[in-house]
Image (tube, rainbow, N blue to C red):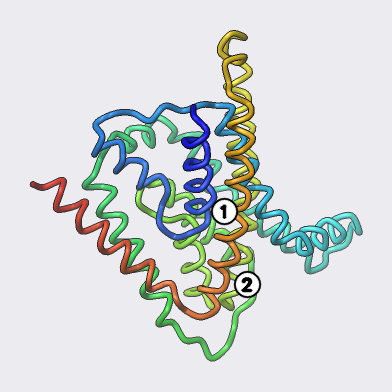
Amino acid sequence: MSLVEAIILGIVQGLTEFLPVSSSGHIELVKAIQGTELEEDLLFTVFLHLATALSTVVVFRKDLVDIFKGILSFKWNEETKFAWFVLISMIPAALVGLFLKDQIETLFDKNVLLVGSMLLVTGVLLYISDTVKRDKAESLSTGKSIIMGIVQAISILPGISRSGSTIVTGVLLGLPRTKAARFSFIMVLPLILGAAAKSLKDFMDMPAVDQASSPIFEMSIGFVVAFISGLFAIKWMIKLVEKSQLKWFAYYCFLVGSASVIYSLV
């Protein structure tokens, strides 16, 4: 891996982890267009996951500190309830990963038609979210957390944006836009850390000679780039959600999605 490749992958990871464009969908499109598989460096994957996790921690550091303080008070308070909602939201994605792993992997086989169709779905969701007007804001609840968790699990499909679909779902359920975005970004933090742990385990299972070949300097630069890109993406996304400006990403998804569907049918 060259330094330039590490920087590009860091930028892509930092931006697409949080912006509503579906990173997995774009990876499948690149694979289909190039006709090749993208080489994965397990240790670098760990670096990138940790970088985006750190971005989330930095942006929401006050919220996370309050949550931990609430948990350590051993009382049922607002912070403890929020932690409970995050825990509940993780269950659908965990179940899908546990029981449908093989079926999911078959979807990641350069299926351009599927990716294009799902990008169109993402575009519709993003466009609709900007038109929603609520007279009265709803509070987060166990039921709403489960629904957002189910949507997060569905977003495993390449072309469905995790951040976009969960934020839109929160808005449609009546949550204030900023609270929907806040919960969407925090609820994925345990899953990012879980993915990093899995990649680290796979890396540790590799032969020592393969482990030693990992370019640590380039990976470190990629980590920093992904971290900075993630900070930018989260803050920008929050502002766009507040101002109901997700329609610009909807137009992008419509464009790429339509082109992908046409490409697959020609």
**Residue 123 falls in image quadrant:** bottom left
Residue at 48% in and 41% down: 9
Q: Nearer the viewer, residue 221 or 238?
A: 221
Residue 71 position in % (x across, y down) = 84, 56
Estimate the x, y position of residue 60 in percent, counting from the top left: 71, 61
- 66 or 225: which is nearer to us? 225
Q: Is residue 138 left or right of residue 38?
A: right
Which amino acid, mark 1? Ser
* Side of 156 relative to 180 (left or right): left
109 vs 67: above or below = above
Q: Residues within 10 Å of mark 1 (few under 14, many from 20)?
A: many
x 31%, y 54%: residue = 118
Q: Is residue 105 above or below residue 256?
A: above
Instruction: Say what amino acid the circle numbered 2 marks.
Output: Lys
Closest to the observer: 259 or 194? 259
Looking at the image, residue 133 lies above or below residue 128: below
10 Å crowding of disc 2: few (<14), some (14-19), many (20+): some
Tell how many labels.
Answer: 2
Left or right, residue 129 beside residue 258: right
Residue 27 percent location from the top left of the image: 37, 42
1 or 2: mark nearer the eye: 1
Judged from this view, the residue extending furthest toward the bottom is 135
Asked which secondary structure carries label 1, the reply is helix
x and y percentages locating residue 89 in the rendered image: 59, 54
SS at mark 2? helix
Q: Nearer the viewer, residue 49 or 162?
A: 49
Write down the residue under mark 2. 179
Q: Which residue is mark 1?
A: 229
